[in-house]
Image (spheres, rainbow, N blue to C red):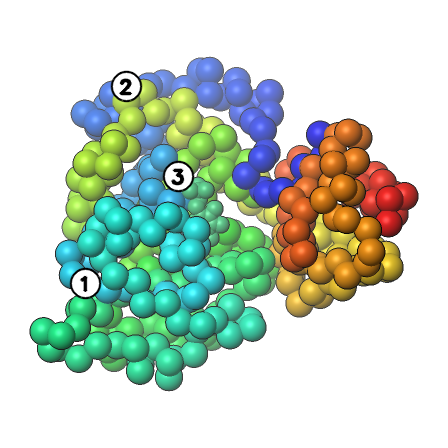
Amino acid sequence: MIDFRSDTVTKPTKTMRDIMYNAPVGDDVYGDDESVNQLEIYACKRFNFEAALYCSSGTQANLLALMAHCERGDEYICGQNAHNYKFEGGGAAVLGSIQPQPIENDADGSIPFNKIAAAIKPDDCHFAKTRLLSLENTIGGKVLPLEYLAQARDFVDMHNLALHLDGARAFNASVELNIDITDITQHFDSVSICLSKGLGGPVGSLLLGSPALINKARRWRKVLGGGMRQAGMLAAAGQFALEHNVERLKDDHENARYLAQKLSEISGFTVDMTNTTNMVYATYAGNISIEEVAKALKQQGILFSPSKQLRLVTHLDITREGIDIFLNALSAHI
Ligand SMILES: *Cc1c(COP(=O)(O)O)cnc(C)c1O
């Protein structure tokens, strides 16, 4: 299968499976899982945070962050396109009694500070209490400028808010900018990192923060049913992914650039060339049904999500040859 639907579809390699098979485990709810503990210690060093928590998913890590920063009746400000607003089932409101205040993202994925400032509520019983600004990097495949992150830190300090990063794909940003991940994460009070996307781990995300914040998050994780027992088999795979699969994200970005270029040469496709990481966004305005094309390509072992606004994602299991096979198959049907 050549699967462009998402970078979540990567499968553990033989080496990763061996690591999982041999991982020392224990009951993580008792704090006894050596592999989970190792991963959390490793993550603290890698991201320069004092505490870390292994979570079942990115959605859970973001929700735990929101619930640890905010109390019932508080609010967080985020982008209109933020994953933790738009794509997480409204979890903060449903499970945390926390109100989102979304603001239209600029084309580069940032949220203008004047609009954020205007959305911060005064201390008045009519309003929810604004507690947190949540940013996402990369967002829709776009890297937020480092300078914007530094400005965000100054902004939240000035307004007495906390700052969370949905860094599901933060490594795509650091690799693209050729900087250390801490150059990005240093600005934030909490960061979530997906191990199961471009990094190629099978399951799980990390949440990083202060010991007090992570203690709260650990408590909520248990409440939400996320206290996993012998989770070390998964955590060990996650650590392997962090140790081996970061630098190679460059290849995914190069492959995405190649795919974007070639796709833009096929008639009917308009490709957004401003994305610089592992996502290619394109619209198709030709006469052929893109749904029918997707069905035909599926017969040939090629998967993509058909829609007017196409998103094609490159990852560990997509090679340059796979992209050529896709482009040839697509051309044959268009
Ligand atoms: C995928 C993703 C998440 C959620 O991760 P899951 O592990 O799928 O729950 C959160 N934020 C962003 C930006 C993502 O891309």
For label 3, the SS is: loop
Q: Which residue is mark 3?
A: 57
For label 2, the SS is: loop
Q: Which residue is mark 2?
A: 26
Labelled pair 2, 3 in contact (Cβ < 8 Å)? no
Q: Hey, what amino acid is under mark 1?
A: Asp
Q: Hey, what amino acid is under mark 2?
A: Gly
Would residue 23 appear left or right of 318 to someone viewing this image?
A: left
Q: Give the label on residue 74, or none.
A: 1
Identify the residue shown where x is 28% and y is 73%: 156
Q: Hey, what amino acid is under mark 3?
A: Ser
First in sequence, mark 3 or 1: give its number.
3
Specify whether tag 3 is near ligand 1 (CB below 8 Å).
yes
- Local packing at callout 3 (Cα closer than 10 Å; few below 14, some 14-19, many 20+) is many
Residue 1: horizontal and vertical position, in percent? 71, 30
Measure how far apart labels 1 and 2 are at the Cα level.
37 Å
Q: Nearer the viewer, mark 2 or mark 3?
A: 3
For label 1, the SS is: strand
Residue in front for this viewpoint, 180 or 134: 134
Residue 139: horizontal and vertical position, in percent? 51, 60
Identify the residue shown where x is 90% and y is 43%: 332
Identify the residue shown where x is 45% and y is 32%: 203
